Image (cartoon, coloured by chain):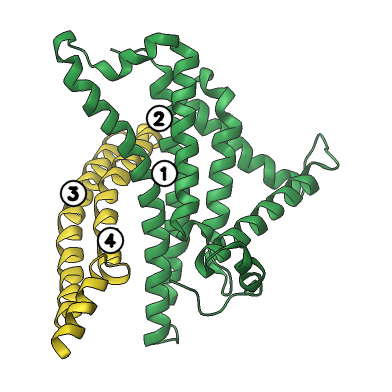
Amino acid sequence: MVHPFLFLQFFRELLHPLGFSEASADAVVYTWLIMIGLVLFSIVATKRLQAVPSGAQNFMEVIVGGIENMLVETMGEHGRPFFPLVATLALFILVSNLIGLIPGFFPPTANINTTAACAVVVFITTHIVGVKEHGAGYIKHFLGPIAWLAPMMFFIEVIGHLSRVISLTLRLFGNMNGHELVLIIFFGLAPFMVPLPMMLMGVLVSFIQAFVFMLLAMIYIQGSLEHAH
Amino acid sequence: MEFFTMCVLAAGIGMALGTLGTGIGQGLAVKSAVEGVSRNPGASGKILTTMMIGLAMIESLAIYALVVCLIILFANPYKEVAMSAIKAVAK
């Protein structure tokens, strides 16, 4: 699917010699736009720190504090080291979902490569954390509770772990891409007022999907921190 | 054109069947969560989090159906075969 009209369309020609297709060029350019926006906003928010926050600092403190509270509630105190990763994923995915609601902007999460990158980051982190925490004993996570069933359980567990990546990827991609598609079709059929409820639904979907991605990332990381049973 | 008509039909039926069971499952999950909150409003935060995870898990089934339907519609692996067969028949 290639968008009909976008603000940063001229990057398609710029990136074409590098072997980017039109759809990937959109996703890459808007990913960079969001990254720059988030960095600039955090610089503005932390430039002049005050004891009694106001404006941008207050806004960022509420968001970051809320994510931190949720992390401690879900993972407990030992989950605090993973706060930067989880909060970054949540903010990036939320902003890239929401940017799709502005006409002329493309949500990078509607491209399967962006969501796959996020899911692979979570997948690799869970296993690095598991090996760091348990050492060689991490293999027990894959062997199941009964010793003589271990050879069979190993393959089932490996498939289970791989399917986490697929489900994380496809959930976010399917939601955002489906939303984009529905909006395009609605705009084609009846451009006046009819797509409005769908766009309202899009706000909800953006928040819920970012929340779910963050929650699942926390749960997967916590699962590899726990002892195998 | 027979092939593409079949593809659109398959995508429509697939989406309908995929969302049917998912809708029932999500309805049951929300029903139990709402009942839990009405019995103990103090536990609404925990119930909401657990319900969200469950709903996300259930919803991914419908999303799989959606992705498969999108593949059928826009990135069909048998498109080339069908096109060459159509051309061969047309000759």
Q: Is residue A77 left or right of residue A116?
A: right
Quick one: label 2 or label 1, which is nearer the N terminus?
A: 1
Contact flag, marks 3 and 1 (Cβ < 8 Å): no
Q: Which residue is mark 3?
A: B25
Which mark lies nearer to you, 4 or 1? 4
Element type where label 4 sits in the image:
helix
Q: CA distance from mark 2 to mark 1?
A: 12 Å
Disc 4 marks which residue?
B66
Q: Are marks 3 and 2 on the same chain?
A: no
Q: Nearer the viewer, residue A32 or B87?
A: B87
Secondary structure category for the residue under label 1: helix
The residue under the point 34% across, 15% down is A139
The CA span between labels 3 and 1 is 18 Å
Please tell me if label 3 and label 1 are on a single chain. no
Which quadrant of the structure image shows residue A80?
A: top right
Question: Which structural element holds mark 3?
Answer: helix
Q: Which residue is mark 1?
A: A212
